[in-house]
Structures are given as structure tokens and as C-alpha cells.
Amino acid sequence: MFTRICTAVVLIVAVLAWLFKADYAIYAMGCLFMYAVGAYEMGPLLGYKSRIPFLLISCVCAVLSFIAVGNPGNFINTGIPSTAQYLTVSGMIVWIGCLPLLIKYPENTGWHKNIVLNTIIGILLLVPFLIGLLILRASEYATNNLAGSLLVLSVMALVWCADSGAYFTGYFLGKHKMLPNVSPKKTVEGLVGGLVTALIGMYIFMQLGWFGQYAENKFALTCACIAAIVFSVIGDLVESMLKRIVGIKDSGKIFPGHGGMLDRIDSQLAAIPVFLTFIWLISGELR
């Protein structure tokens, strides 16, 4: 427990420093670090016998993505290109596509034997997350270099609020299992409690002005937040399903007492791109 607490404290300090002390270039390096470690850990979950092949494929895909969108450093000056938007939205393919896989687990896991399909799934889990993080941090950077930091923190904090609310609601009130074969401890009551807690957090963040320009369309923001919260649960369930299929408890050991990088960001992999997708679709900003 002591190790777990110490790791949590270090992670909190590191994340806050990454968000509020680092300039955009250093922030981008942090995003790439998360991406690379996540890719390194994801290989075995996708059926690779070694971690290196999928890591290399992921690095190539990241390079190709940057070629497609241009230098991400330009996001803060010239705005977000449409290619970056569509790369982020592409994440919806895998998150929606994973729903029937979750429902049919463990009766139908034959799809996991297709390494090509698994590779595509893995890339669509990671690349939209990476591009989405860079887009969020670039928000209003030219006029207020901390606006994007608060925005990233707000979206991530929605997930943390949902996780906390789901845990305590499920612990005290949970009776109806959601997907017991995938995650035995998750309940419908916990999902509702997490959603309510996160919506309270959303309201507080809106009052504090943390959503910045995204709060101009409150309907779009509310829908995006609800979608991000719901899909963050799906992100957690997808990683749990993959770990169960291959018989792995933790994706890695980079964080003592907390497992791997994917164990920390699995919900964020879904929340970040889903949040942006719904904002753009509802507000009509998807070009």
C-alpha cells in the first residue's frame, strides 16, 4: 500500500508538471512517451510474442500521422488541420466496433487470432489518443498558454471522477453486474454513480472556466462529456478483455503498485478522441 501511495503522489506531481510547467514541445514529448510505452505494452495483448514488432509498427504509424497532419507544433499557430481531426475521429471505429466483442466475450474470441486485425485495432486505440492530446493542449495557446492545460486536465479529470464515483457507488449499492465475464466488479449502479459524479465534476469545471472555448456551445460540451465518460468505461473494459484473452494481469510494471502505462490510461484512450469527436460533430466544426 505504501508503494502504491508513493507512486500515486509521484504520478500526480509529474502530470501537473507536464501540463502546467512544460511548454508545448516538452508536452508533445510527454505524449510521445505515453504513446511509445503504451505501444510497447500493447503488443502481447494483441497476440504478439514479442513487444518489439508492434512498437515498431506504432512508431511508423506515428511518423506517418505527423507527415499527414504536418508539424504538431504548428497547431498552436495555424490551427488544427482537417487531417488531424479525421485521424482523431477514426478512433470511433474501434470503440464502436469493440462493443459486440465485449458483449459476446468469452464465447467469441476467434477474432483475436487475426494478428492483422489486432494490429489495426491497436493502432486505432493509440494514434487518435496521441493526436487528440496534442489538439487539446494547443487550444487557445497563442492567447493563453495554460488554457489547453486546463482543458486536458478537465477531460482527464472527468474520467477520474467517473472512476471514483463508480467505485464507491458500486461498493455500497452495486447489485447488477454489467459485464461479469469481462470485469466482475463493475456494476450498472456503479456506471450510473460514476456518470453522475463526473457530470457534477463537469459542472464545476465549467464554472471554473476550464473548458475554455469549448464551453461556448454548452449543449455540444455536455454531450461530449457524457460520451467521453461512457466510452471511458468501454476503454477500461476493452483492456480488461484483451488481458483476459491472453492471460495477463497487468499490462506492464512501469508504475510500482499500479501496473503498466495502459493500466493507467486505458480509459483515457477512449475519452480523449471521443470527447473531441462529439464536440466537432455536434458543433459542426468537423471540416
Image (cartoon, rainbow, N blue to C red):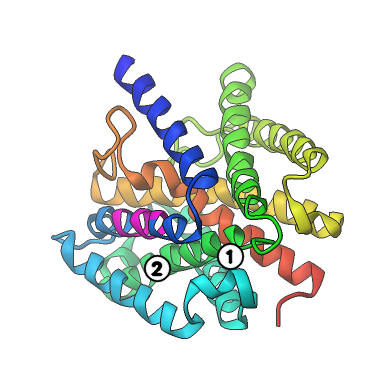
Q: Which mark is residue 121?
A: 2
Secondary structure mostly seen in magenta is: helix
Q: Which residues are magenta?
A: 30-37
Q: Secondary structure at mark 1?
A: helix
Q: Mark 2 touching mark 1, by CB under 8 A?
A: no
Q: Earlier in the sequence, mark 2 or mark 1?
A: 2
Q: Position of residue 82 (x, y in %)?
A: 62, 82
Q: Quadrant of residue 50?
A: bottom left
Q: Position of residue 126 (x, y in %)?
A: 42, 63
* Quarter of the rendering occupied by the N terminus: top left
Of 242 and 261, the residue lying toward us? 261
Q: Position of residue 28 (x, y in %)?
A: 44, 60
Q: Which mark is residue 135?
A: 1
* Lateral position of residue 257 relative to residue 107, left or right: left
Task: Tell me if mark 1 has few (under 14), some (14-19) or many (20+) residues whose alpha carbon lies within 10 angstroms of its own.
Answer: many
- Above-or-below relation of 49 to 209: below
- The image shows a total of numbered marks equal to 2
- Residue at horizontal 26 percent and vertical 71 percent from the top: 115
- Above-or-below relation of 234 to 133: above
* Lateral position of residue 178 relative to residue 281, left or right: left
Amino acid type, mark 2: Ile
* Real-space Cα separation, disc 2 to disc 1, in angstroms: 22 Å
